[in-house]
Amino acid sequence: MEIQAMRDVDVTKVDPQTLIDIREIKTDSNLTPKKRMEQFIHQIGNPYCYKYGDYIVKIGFEDTEDTLEDRLKDLILKAGRR
């Protein structure tokens, strides 16, 4: 799926069974941030729309200069500190 299509997923129409629960994602903290991000993306599928238990989560960003890569690095680094 292309980035734009991932970003444009309609949460009111998405099948929850097709989404990955973010709590199931595991990344290897020994990997470089880039490799951890690749590992995360491979597991989550769509980083813009996923599940957290029974909830469907859709993320977006305000107008900012941060890229999806920047935001994913932050997310993965924070998750590694848990």
Image (cartoon, helix red, strand yellow):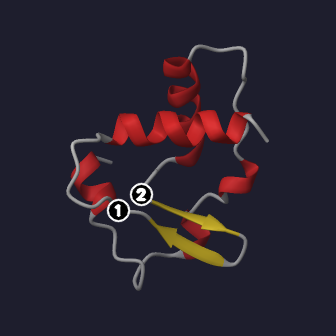
User: In the picture, residue 35 is in which quadrant?
Assistant: top right
Q: Residue 39 location, x and y as percent? A: 58, 29
The outermost residue toward the front is 64
Residue highlighted by disc 1: 60
Mark 2 surroundings within 10 Å by alpha-carbon count, few (fewer than 14), some (14 through 19), many (20 or more): some
Quadrant where the C terminus is found in the figure: top right
Q: Are marks 1 and 2 in contact (CB under 8 Å)?
A: yes
Element type where label 1 sits in the image: loop
User: Relative to 66, does residue 49 appear above or below in the rendering?
Assistant: below
User: Relative to 12, does residue 76 appear above or below in the rendering?
Assistant: above
Residue drawn at x 34%, y 76% as measured from the top left: 10
User: Relative to 54, does residue 39 appear above or below in the rendering?
Assistant: above
Q: Which amino acid type corresponds to the residue marked 1 in the rendered image?
A: Gly
Residue drawn at x 56%, y 47% as measured from the top left: 44
Q: Is residue 64 left or right of residue 26?
A: left
Residue highlighted by disc 2: 48
Give whichever of 30, 78 is nearer the camera: 78
Q: Is residue 49 left or right of residue 69?
A: right
Which of pointers 1 and 2 lies earlier in the amino acid sequence? 2
User: Relative to 38, does residue 60 appear above or below in the rendering?
Assistant: below
Q: Is residue 80 left or right of residue 59?
A: right
Q: Is residue 80 visible?
A: yes
Q: Which amino acid type corresponds to the residue marked 2 in the rendered image?
A: Tyr
Q: Is residue 41 visible?
A: no
Q: Residue 80 location, x and y as percent? A: 71, 34
The outermost residue toward the bottom is 12
Element type where label 2 sits in the image: loop
Q: Residue 51 location, x and y as percent? A: 61, 66
Q: Residue 79 location, x and y as percent? A: 68, 41
Residue drawn at x 49%, y 20% as measured from the top left: 34
Residue drawn at x 34%, y 42% as measured from the top left: 68
Mark 1 surroundings within 10 Å by alpha-carbon count, few (fewer than 14), some (14 through 19), many (20 or more): few
